[in-house]
Amino acid sequence: MTRFIDLPALAQLVQQVGVPRFISELAQTIQNDFLRWEDFDKSPRLASHSQLGVIELMPVADAERYAFKYVNGHPGNTARGLPTVMAFGVLAEVSTGYPLLLSELTLTTAFRTAATSAMAARALARPGSRRMALIGNGAQSEFQALAFHHLVGIDEISVYDLDPKATDKLVRNLAAYPTLRVRRATSVADAVRGADIVTTVTADKTRAAILTAEMIEPGVHINGVGGDCPGKTELHPEVLRGARVFVEYEPQTRVEGDIQQMAADFPVVDLWRVLAGTAEGRQSDAQVTVFDSVGFALEDFSALSYVYRLACAHGVGRDVDLVPTADDPKDLFRFTSSAPAPVALRRVA
């Protein structure tokens, strides 16, 4: 049978293990999979764009497991009472194609994006980084703040959003974490002043320059999360020209990331190579580094694998008859009968 994890089940898992442990174990799972990068069959995501947003399919597989995520990005959704990003995914056996897990990935994607950001920052930011600017205080912001707090050691964040209500929400939610100091900034420039790390996580599907070169201080690490589809950027080209830039999967980032603004031969470094020790990360304390993060399917593979292990270990979720398994697998028509023959179901560990 297929384990089904809906939003309440995922929330139950997070509450049982706690947010810090969930983020930490997820980040370690992602890093472990990045370290076996060459084991995976990879491709850029398949995107269907409209004037209002984008719907994407993100597949990846190794020799044993296949995963995909369905995800959208519609910045106008909040006016309709819907999330900007909604997602679900499947983890399946490669040997049989049998679906092991059908899971919500909206909440999980927020966790995996933040965990990936913190994983990259541990490899790229200056040691001892303690202050972060967080530009964009929407649905992803709390997850980014807590990932950097628990995994990187950030103890103060300066927050800014064009929508004061978004900042109100962020400050209210982070009040439960008194070891993380939150300062409201009056502008982007005010927020980034003196920051060791700058995270940009805005939602508008526009070619924007939220960070400009004059705002950038020597040695800062920029975690660019919001520029994640064609025509959507957050960093001025001069910021990129003055930095050492790191990417998840270059063929995808060239199309979707902030480097879509740059020439095709603009130099970038694969993050997985830095983690594996085959490429340099930060080369000096004064160097500006940029993680041009667009989100890659391997991170969802890791997230689905982690959720599946956790759900089985804690007995969370329920098993569903997603696909037919019967005594005679060639007789699919029996399920059209008003009294179909008993189905012999197999349990998947």
Image (spheres, grey):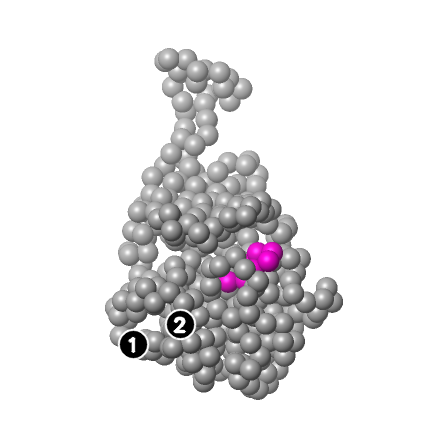
Residue nearest the viewer, comparing 303 with 72: 72
Question: Horizontally, is 233 left or right of 171 in the view?
Answer: right
Q: Which SS does the magenta portion mostly show?
A: loop
Question: Horizontally, is 39 left or right of 128 in the view?
Answer: right
Percent x, y for residue 260? Answer: 64, 62
Q: Which residues are magenta?
A: 226-232
Q: Which quadrant of the structure image shows residue 263?
A: bottom right
Position of 42 relative to 327 (above/below):
below
Residue at 38%, 73% (x, y): give it: 159
**Label 2: which secondary element:** strand
- Residue 43 numbered tag: none
- Residue 179 numbered tag: 1
Q: Which residue is mark 2?
A: 160
Residue at 44%, 70% (x, y): give it: 135
- Inter-mark Cα distance, 2 to 1: 20 Å
Specify the amino acid type for callout 1.
Answer: Thr
**Label 1: which secondary element:** loop
Residue nearest the viewer, comparing 205 with 93: 205
Residue nearest the viewer, comparing 320 with 227: 227
